Amino acid sequence: MKPPHYCRYLTNKAFFFPPPVDVRPEEGLHTPCRCNQTQETLGPDGALVCVDACSGPGRSCYLADVEL
């Protein structure tokens, strides 16, 4: 499951499938990500989509998955 501070449009297969037994959950987040807005590995702002870059309101295209 995706942590709430990640962008709503960030997609990573680790959010949907449990990692193998011998892999810690945070290690599964290092698989390639994509943006659901562009359907590519680049976001609408032209920057690379990754867990680190899409985990806070620092990007112009960021939209919180859960409004707190």
Image (tube, rainbow, N blue to C red):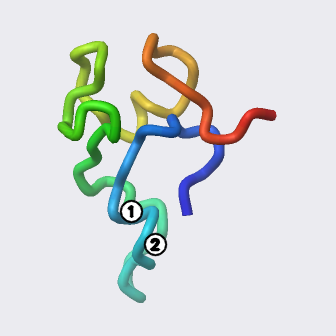
Q: Amino acid at mark 2?
A: Arg
Q: Residue 11: x, y in percent?
A: 37, 49
User: Which quarter of the rendered picture does the N terminus lie within?
Assistant: bottom right
- In percent of the image, x 35 and y 55: which residue is there? 12
Marks 1 & 2, CB-CB < 8 Å contact: yes
- In percent of the image, x 65 and y 45: which residue is there? 4
Neighbourhood count class around disc 1 (C-alpha, 10 Å): few under 14, some 14–19, many 20 upward: few
Pick the front one: 32 or 23: 32
Q: Where does label 1 land, which residue?
A: 27
Q: Where does label 2 land, which residue?
A: 24
Pick the front one: 40 or 4: 40
**Secondary structure under the numbered disc 1 in the rendered image:** helix
4 shown above or below 18: above
54 shown above or below 39: above
Q: Is residue 19 left or right of residue 35?
A: right
Q: Residue 7: x, y in percent?
A: 51, 35
Q: Residue furthest toward the right?
A: 68
